[in-house]
Image: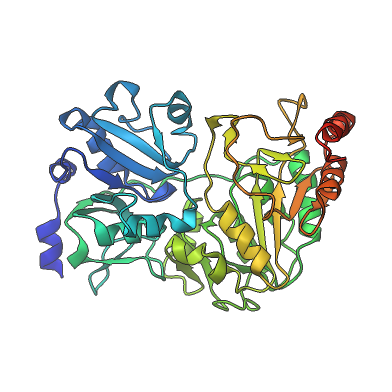
Amino acid sequence: MHTQYDDKRCSPGEAIELLKDGDFIIVPSGAGEPPTLLHALSEQRTRFRDVKVAQILAMRKYGYFDCDTVQHVRHVALFFGGASRSAGQAGWADFIPAYFSELPSLIERGMVPSDVVFSMASPMDEHGNFALSLGADYTMAAIQKARVVVLEVNPNVPYAHGQCHVHISQVTALVESNEPVIEVGLPKIGPVQEAIAGYVAEMIEDGSTLQIGYGGIPDAVVMQLTSKHDLGVHTEMIGDGILKLVESGAVNNSRKTYLPNKMVATFALGSRKLYDFMHRNPMLEMHPVNYTNDPYLAGQNNQLVAINASLQVDLLGQCGSESIAHLPYSGTGGQVDFVRAANRSRGGKAFIVLPSTAKEGSVSRIVCTLTPGTHVTTGKNDVNYVVTEYGVAQLRGKSAHQRAEALIAIAHPDFRAELRQAAKKILLC
């Protein structure tokens, strides 16, 4: 094993030599991105033509995030974040719309190319395996298709259990680094977020299994669950909020009906403390996203609770969660996957959470019809609970008129009369 390791070890510059013009590079979600490799690619980007780097949630603005060199190397977003959003809104970063759960199958079928994989990895174990613990997601599928697989091996990456292991025989080249894994703190939580979280937390029963999306409101919910009992976790992202629930004793996974006693996720994003918690922890398994986010599999957890944020909801319940009008803001991610999973689950509950207003109270987020150009994320037939700081609207099984009334009731009071008048014009009230 060590001979193979030594033979494949190389410098970042030598790893970049493996690329060809036109290559499509797959990079894992978030903290799984390999900074040493991507900085090296940035430095040499003008050597190449039409190379694309595809990723969910880029964490750093690398040198190739450059509108003047997109003919050399271009970012392809599977989900926009802070590092990539401005490029997407300016139109010089590409965007592939997709459900998170289906990205592996799109890669397997060749609908999304995978010529090269660049990924962070844990050090190799005695059996020749590396763990892609920070982002198993779609990367495991990409490795099966790629011509070149380059791992950035870093001792700060945890070695996790689950279907996240790559054998040395599958690897083309290894680059070593030792910089700390990028850390992301908990979002700021204010009184509006706390009020929304209070409504949601009240409806979560002991023994529920949680999927927690990223953001201030989902994390505010987590902070109000520390006194619950026997909670489980089946989610896409594991972060510090979930770690707090484990530390408080609220999460023990004992009443899960699918993979009992195990918490399951596909990528990690949090603090050093979280990454240390993940290392060889038998309670946690990291799996590809077509496993964690498959609505059929996730829905086999009884009392599955899905908590996800949106930007805008119309009076039929359609959610525009990923764009501001036509401008991309984030992406579909796993919202629809887990809404459908919770709807399948016995006793499951899917929550869409959002403040009632935006722009310091001047704009209602509950709208009669979605702003023209808005990317619809979760459709009206899937949405069940919509929660603002003014209450909960339960939609499934309700008529169009009933939905409109329920959503107007949780809109900000300043906009309710205006919404009712608009709804009458399109015969919803």
x, y percent for residue 293: 52, 62
Asked if residue 29 is positioned above or below residue 210 in the image, the reply reads: above
At x 34% / y 61%, what residue is drawn?
140
x, y percent for residue 224: 74, 56
Residue 415 is drawn in which quadrant?
A: top right
Q: Is residue 249 visible?
A: yes
Q: Is residue 211 visible?
A: no
Q: Is residue 420 left or right of residue 303?
A: right
Q: Is residue 214 left or right of residue 61?
A: right
x, y percent for residue 118: 28, 49
Residue farthest along the top direction in this orientation = 68
Q: Is residue 335 left or right of residue 248?
A: left
Q: Is residue 100 left or right of residue 213?
A: left
At x 30% / y 30%, what residue is drawn?
64
Quadrant in the picture for the N terminus: bottom left
Q: Nearer the viewer, residue 246 or 34?
A: 34
At x 54% / y 34%, what residue is drawn?
329
Q: Nearer the viewer, residue 242 or 289?
A: 289
Quadrant in the picture for the C terminus: top right
Asked if residue 398 is positioned above or below residue 161 in the image, the reply reads: above
